[in-house]
Image (tube, rainbow, N blue to C red):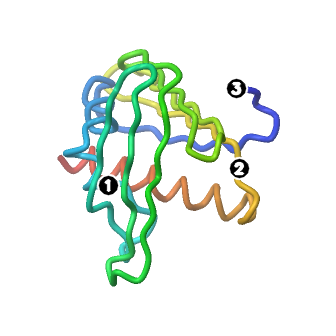
Amino acid sequence: MSTQNTIQIESKILAPVEVVWQYFTDPEHVVNWNNASPDWHTPKAENDLQVGGKFSYTMAAKDASFSFDFWGVYDTVKENQLLEYTLGDNRKVSVAFISEGDDTRILESFEPETENSADMQKAGWQAILNNFKNYVEEN
């Protein structure tokens, strides 16, 4: 994926890469962290973790006023190292898992959509990654 016209976020998580990978990819865990704010949640998550496999996460307002499926197809799956996928709207995403001893750094890059500002998108994706970090470190 070209880094031109991409948004990048990152987080250092105080857990080994094997744990971080499992919590990031296992639907049983995804439903617990995949939201950008407390008034949203992910009531359903599915993940076929292989090249050509599809993931789908239903993201919904807790008041049931709105929901949508965030989904994509995997282009690259390197266990404990790298996920690359194409979203349903053809945007590309790359998630690198970098082992740093007992900790893991996640570097996430994604092509922005055109409806919302780049700053808003970066803040939203970072909020989800921050929720992920908190979930992993609390469990």
Task: Classify 10 Å Cα crowding around label 2: few (below 14), some (14-19), many (20 and above).
Answer: some
Q: Earlier in the sequence, mark 1 or mark 3?
A: 3
> Which residue occupies 56% across, 61% down?
124
Question: Which amino acid, mark 2?
Answer: Pro
Nearer the camera: disc 1 or disc 3 = 3
**Which quadrant of the view contains residue 88?**
top right
Nearer the camera: disc 2 or disc 1 = 2
Q: Is residue 14 left or right of residue 84?
A: left
Q: Earlier in the sequence, mark 2 or mark 1?
A: 1
Q: What number is the disc on residue 112?
A: 2
Q: What number is the disc on residue 1?
A: 3
Q: Is residue 132 left or right of residue 111?
A: left
Residue 26 spot, x, y in % from top left: 25, 37
- Residue located farthest toward the top when viewing the structure as drawn: 78
Question: Mark 2 and mark 1: span between their CA atoms?
Answer: 22 Å
Question: Mark 1 and mark 3: span between their CA atoms?
Answer: 26 Å
Question: Which amino acid, mark 3?
Answer: Met
49 over 47 or under it: above or below? above
**Which quadrant of the view contains residue 108?**
top right
15 over 68 or under it: above or below? above
> Which residue occupies 27% across, 56% down?
44
